[in-house]
Image (tube, rainbow, N blue to C red):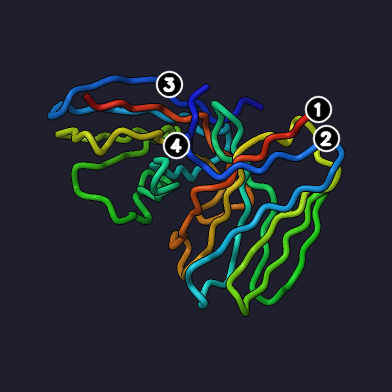
Amino acid sequence: KAGVTQTPRYLIKTRGQQVTLSCSPISGHRSVSWYQQTPGQGLQFLFEYFSETQRNKGNFPGRFSGRQFSNSRSEMNVSTLELGDSALYLCASSPRPGNHNEQFFGPGTRLTVL
Amino acid sequence: GESVGLHLPTLSVQEGDNSIINCAYSNSASDYFIWYKQESGKGPQFIIDIRSNMDKRQGQRVTVLLNKTVKHLSLQIAATQPGDSAVYFCAENTGGTYKYIFGTGTRLKVLA
């Protein structure tokens, strides 16, 4: 069974631009969560989608948004990029929401904002 | 692969020895804890969890100990192997399905 895939793996953008990251969950997994990981803050929860609906949202500004498609694939978008948005963005999928011991992470997208 | 934390505390252990990785958590009301392993260039991987009504839980070669009095969590890895080299971090659930605080982690280096 293929794991969680994220594209692109690396991305360089400049301040003010926007970016869209993609995540394909493990087949059969309907819950997709997004996290931001930085050296200083560790992992921080962004949002979680299940059946195309956002179920939970972390404490991030409205510039961070996401969506989920009917095939469970998910995208997240960051608008008006700031230098502080430079981070590793991780996607994780699980069969059901909130099941952390059945949650599998992708390798992440490394975003650098210049 | 990319480095998640360039200035993490590092624990160097000889292959075959036991490793102990520590984590201090912040919220005395936290009732669920997870340990993750993150290898270079990969996402975190769930290792083991423990609920606050337990002091100890064992998995395959790993044991998690919880000391609620001093808000301390530890991960013990028996007979450490080169494949155990990674960053390990803990997470505490502060209430609610997604109310987690994640630690920044400790880098484990296994010396041959």
Residue drawn at x 57%, y 49% is B89
Image quarter hosting the C terminus of chain A = top left
The residues tagged by marks 2 and 4 sit, at their Cα atoms, a distance apart of 30 Å
Q: Do callouts 1 and 2 mark residues in contact (Cβ within 8 Å)?
A: yes
Task: Please name the residue that numbered disc 4 is placed on.
Answer: A90
* Residue A103 image position (x, y, % from top left): 58, 45
Q: Nearer the viewer, residue B68 or A34?
A: B68
Mark 2 element type: loop
Foreground: disc 1 or disc 4: 1
Check disc 4 and give the amino acid type: Leu
Mark 4 element type: strand
Check disc 3 and give the amino acid type: Arg
Task: Please name the residue that numbered disc 1 is placed on.
Answer: B112
Q: Do callouts 2 and 4 mark residues in contact (Cβ within 8 Å)?
A: no
Check disc 2 and give the amino acid type: Glu
Task: Please name the residue that numbered disc 2 is placed on.
Answer: B15
Could you confirm whether marks 1 and 4 are on the same chain?
no
The residues tagged by marks 1 and 2 sit, at their Cα atoms, a distance apart of 5 Å
Check disc 1 and give the amino acid type: Ala
Q: Nearer the viewer, residue A63 or B41?
A: B41
Dividing the picture into quadrants, the one containing residue A6 is: top left
Q: Do callouts 1 and 3 mark residues in contact (Cβ within 8 Å)?
A: no
Task: Please name the residue that numbered disc 3 is placed on.
Answer: A9
Q: Label 4 crowding class (10 Å Cα cut-off): few <14, some 14-19, many 20+?
A: many
Which comes sooner in the sequence, label 1 or label 2? 2
Residue drawn at x 28%, y 20% is A12
